[in-house]
Amino acid sequence: MKLFGKLRSLCGGMLLVACTFSAWSATPKYIFYFIGDGMGVAPAMASVTYARNVLGQEELPLMMTFPYTGLALTYSASSDVTDSAAAGTALATGYKTNNSMLGMTPDSVPVYSIAKTFKDAGYGVDLVTNLKKKNTTPGAFYAHVPKRYYSDQIDRQFIDSNFDFLAGAALTGLYDRDGKSNGIIEEYEKNNIKIIHSPKDVDLSKRMILLQENPFQSGNTGYMIDSIPGMMTLPEMTQSCLDYLTQKTPDGFFMMVEGGNIDHALHGNDALTAITEIYNFNNALQLAYNFMQTRPEETLIVVTADHDTGGISVGNNQNGYVAHFDVLKHQKMSKEMFSDVCKNLLKNGNPGGWPAMQQLLGEKFGFGNEVPLTDAEMGALEKLYRQVFEEKGSEDEKSLYNDFNAFASAVFRTLSNKAAVGWTTGHHTGNPVGVYSVGAGAENFSRVFNNIELPGVILRTAGF
């Protein structure tokens, strides 16, 4: 109660607007907060288009079937285009802050999340992501740092949060610049925090950190499209945390689940990989929905995104009013994985030459087979191939989380052009994001919000 009052006053009335409803119809004890990283309205629509036109499925993603929907604006205190730290802080605490700041106001005053409010009231608290543990969305719920890259501080501050369970791809702040251990693992052990790499090793007597043993190169668990052996999936992590909470704090809990791989794929302008991750996110959401069916009067599920990434569109200049998403069904690997293949070929002296690459493009993307290319399109790829692999005259293309081989980037631009997928950026946009809700008090989430309003509405719906 005290924390919420402070949030309301410091937000300049933003949360006050969210808290002046005439009545609250229910008081949920189990609150699920699902955040699709980068999953703006347009990426969600791309997943619908693919399902309908390629898979023959008219059913919408689960989140889009929820009875109450709205929109959220995402700008930060410093920019019309937010970064993940400022967006995460807004969704966790109800405060606008500057890009790159986490759990602090622009003048560096620490602010506290609704997860802390729930924990202080005796609820269990779990945070789940398929990105690195310090990733800015989970970190926004317990950390307070002026820069999102202060990994060691973010890792240490989890200790003080007293939260029950954290699941993600990796720890990040274990070593200093000289490669020496900074003692965080030992501090976790002293504070009854156990690090595990399998849901089978969950111990109810301890606080848990569940991590993938070998995270993917950009710090995520890997993409579903790549079928990486040993990869932990977001549904598996979600189920593990849910099982833990239902046993340890059966009378009430708060659970945040982030689909972080959606954002990574969109930063790379990789449409099908992003679409498969949106459906992976919805598979995790299904677990919460199944739980709600057993406690319909006591459970609230709210789904949103921290921001939109990539500026994706269904349709582009090359294809007019026709989309060809069926082209995407021939893609067999993510852009990150194909870039790795190209880098390894370059490193190993380009065995097989252009004929071998043509065959690979046919096998992995359908180029020249199911996806016919014009002579000009194939010729442009061959020319760039020789420049990159034979003349070695092209640098990698940098994105926020990866440096893509230049040839791999050209292949994916060609794929998007053929499929009628448009992109405006490899970064975030200022576009609004969806808000989807179901369960006890879900009707309170059906309008256009400023993102800092959502934490207050959640708290009030839960009776705080």
Image: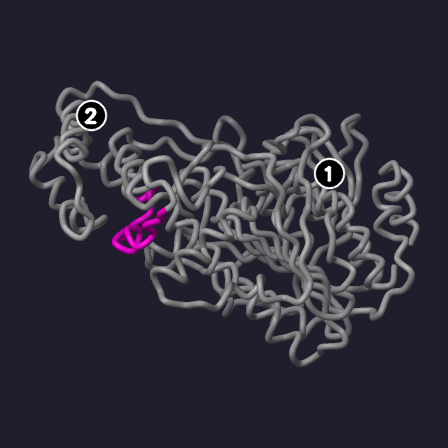
Give the percent coordinates (x, y) of residue 456: 81, 51
- For disc 1, the marked residue is 103
Q: Residue at x 51, y 27 (%)?
A: 177
Q: Is residue 227 magenta?
A: no
In this rendering, position of residue 331 left or right of residue 156: left
Frontmost of labels 1 and 2 is 2
Q: Residue at x 65, y 46 (%)?
A: 187
Count of numbered tags: 2
In this rendering, position of residue 399 left or right of residue 351: right
Asked if residue 370 is positioned above or below residue 378 in the image, the reply reads below
Asked if residue 407 is positioned above or below residue 253 in the image, the reply reads above
Q: Residue at x 75, y 34 (%)?
A: 104
Give the percent coordinates (x, y) of residue 51: 41, 61
- For disc 2, the marked residue is 388
What secondary structure is found at the residue carrying circle 1? loop
Residue type, numbered disc 2: Val
Task: State the mark number for residue 399.
Answer: none
Any part of residue 293 in sight: yes
Give the percent coordinates (x, y) of residue 271: 39, 46
Residue interval drawn in magenta: 322-337
Counting residues from the start of the chain, the first of labels 1 and 2 encountered is 1
Q: Nearer the viewer, residue 118 or 91?
A: 91
Tag 1 and tag 2, C-beta contact below 8 Å: no
In this rendering, position of residue 84 left or right of residue 441: left
Q: Nearer the viewer, residue 4 or 78?
A: 78
| Placement of the C terminus among the 4 image quadrants | bottom right
Q: How is the image coloured?
A: one colour
Residue type, numbered disc 1: Gly
Give the percent coordinates (x, y) of residue 226: 32, 54
